[in-house]
Amino acid sequence: MRLTYFGHSAVQIETGDKTLLFDPFITGNPLAESVTSADSLSPDVIILTHAHGDHWGDTLEIAKRCDALVVANFEITEYTRRNGHENVQPMNTGGGIQFEWGTLIQTYARHSSSFPDGTYGGNPNGYVLYAEDRCVYNSGDTCAFMEMIWIGNHHPIDLALLPIGDVYTMGIHGARHAAHLIEPKLTIPVHYDTFPAIRADTEEWQELMKEIERETRILRPGESFDL
Ligand code: NI
Ligand code: MN
């Protein structure tokens, strides 16, 4: 599978002939706008961790144009339907679905979730994705939490996408703790450097990953990585 990072939590995964896009916050995301635009993306599936504007982003515009399947918690898929896009798959925490392109399990995340217009966005989530004999954990916006041990025990995680920007999510020290609990083979940090408030020290992050003997990979916006 091929993963492309657009900055913040916008991550594209190409697997087989399908393109999955997590949290497509492109317009207004200075990292993403330096390398792509919402109208140049054409995913088959959009997967949302929660409803905040920096994750929901360009979902409606992209989903309508591409007739992409929108996978998210029930409140988010209902909001999507009310706004004119019917191709949705609701889930709720702990649920899993086997799609033709892989299996997706919705996990718990400790955060909040409301739409930019104030509408309730259900509970925030992360995802475990199985595709092509790989297992990817996208934690979503969260702090470290003890149940991450279960996620790591139940799933042989090859790659964990972890926020490190602090302020709204865990920072590098919290994410170090998360990586220690999950024990993924590889971590890729997300949700940092988009705005001044969430600048992160990636040098120190790499040192922290060395300390707990986890591989990490820093991706520049627009950079792709084959897993
Ligand atoms: Ni958020
Ligand atoms: Mn966020």
Image (cartoon, rainbow, N blue to C red):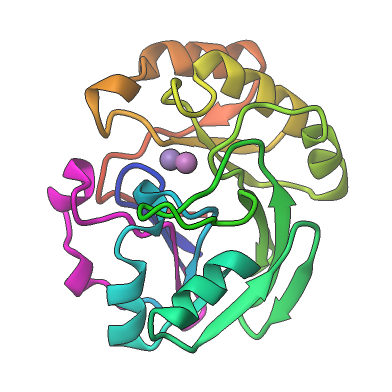
Residue at position x 36%, y 30% in the image = 192
Q: Is residue 183 visible?
A: yes
| Residue 136 seen anywhere in this rendered image of the structure | no
Q: Which residues are magenta?
A: 14-42
Task: Judge whether 205 appears above or below 66 on screen.
Answer: above
- Which quadrant of the figure has residue 115? bottom left
Q: Quick check: 125 above or below 147?
A: below
Q: Quadrant of ligand 2?
A: top left
Verify whether residue 126 appears in magenta. Answer: no
In the image, farthest residue toward the left: 34
Indicate whether residue 28 is drawn in magenta.
yes
Pick whichever, 48 or 78, lies toward us.
78
- Choose top left, top right, bottom left or bottom right for residue 4: bottom left
Position in image of residue 81 (x %, y %): 48, 82
Residue name at image x 74 percent, y 34 percent: 182
Task: In this rendered view, identify the residue nearer to me: 29 or 134.
Answer: 29
- Relative placement, left or right, of 193 versus 3 is left
Instruction: Tell me: residue 180, above or below residue 119.
Output: above
Q: Residue at x 40, y 58 (%)?
A: 56
The picture places residue 14, in percent across and down from the top left corner, at: 45, 69
- x then y, percent, for residue 195: 24, 29
- Please tell me how many numbered marks the rendered image carries: 0
Residue at left offset 59%, top offset 34%? 142
